[in-house]
Image: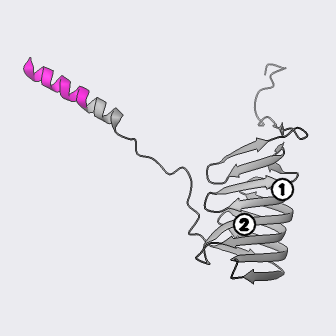
């Protein structure tokens, strides 16, 4: 009887400790900070004092699976010149990642946070689905986004049903 009671107490204690112990956290996002950014353009102006580089003319920047196209790109470096803190894209901005396309007139890419913010007529297209609003914020490595509106611009989403699903009206 005492042995059975001890086993029961040990099992209960083990269960309580398992619940109390912090769960092993899996990284929510991929760390791209060590990956190179390849930028091509017609022209480049660099100011090492302010740690800013401005690329102009048919700019194409690739960072892992994210590709940014624009007319002008401003790159802000940290203390270590190879450490990119932020990228601003202006004019005819197109950002492609896998099957997603984001367009706007201005975008900010915070590389360490994996955060892209589209402003000035932003639109995201994925397959045949679209979303527009005042500001679209996309968390690159978390596969999530937020879309905000203001008094003049409302959020609008067009979502198409996936093919092969039953037609609800016909009951098929």
- Pinpoint residue 21: horizontal percent, then vertical percent: 34, 39
Residue at x 89%, y 41% (from the top left corner): 153
Q: Which residue is mark 2?
A: 87
Q: Which quarter of the figure is the C terminus placed in?
A: top right
Q: Residue 3: where, in percent of width, then height?
A: 9, 23
Q: Position of residue 20 (x, y in %)?
A: 34, 35
- Is the residue 15 above or below the residue 124 in the image? above
Check disc 1 and report the residue beneath it: 103
- Going 19% across and 25% down the picture, which residue do you hit? 9
Instruction: Give me the disc on residue 134.
Output: none
On screen, residue 48 versus residue 90, left or right, reads left
Left or right of residue 13: residue 77: right
Circle 2 crowding by C-alpha within 10 Å: few under 14, some 14–19, many from 20: many
Give the magenta-colored segment's residue range. Answer: 1-13
Question: Which colour style is shown?
Answer: one colour
Q: Residue 150 lies in what quarter of the image? A: top right
Whether residue 40 can be seen here = no
* Secondary structure beneath label 2: strand
**What residue appears at the point 32 percent right and 35 percent down from the top-left corner?**
18
């Amino acid at each position: 009887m005492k042995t059975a009671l001890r086993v029961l107490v040990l099992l209960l204690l083990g269960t309580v400790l398992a619940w109390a112990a912090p769960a092993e956290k899996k990284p929510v996002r991929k760390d791209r900070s060590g990956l190179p950014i390849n930028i091509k353009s017609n022209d480049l102006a660099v100011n090492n004092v302010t740690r800013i580089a401005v690329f102009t003319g048919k700019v194409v920047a690739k960072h892992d699976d994210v590709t940014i196209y624009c007319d002008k790109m401003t790159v802000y470096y940290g203390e270590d010149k190879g450490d990119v803190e932020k990228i601003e894209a202006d004019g005819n901005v197109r950002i492609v990642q896998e099957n997603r396309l984001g367009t706007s007139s201005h975008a900010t890419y915070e590389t360490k946070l994996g955060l892209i913010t589209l402003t000035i007529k932003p639109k995201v297209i994925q397959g045949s689905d679209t979303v527009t609003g005042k500001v679209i914020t996309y968390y690159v490595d978390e596969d999530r986004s937020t879309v905000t509106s203001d008094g003049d611009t409302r959020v609008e989403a067009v979502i198409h049903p996936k093919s092969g699903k039953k037609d609800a009206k016909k009951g098929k």
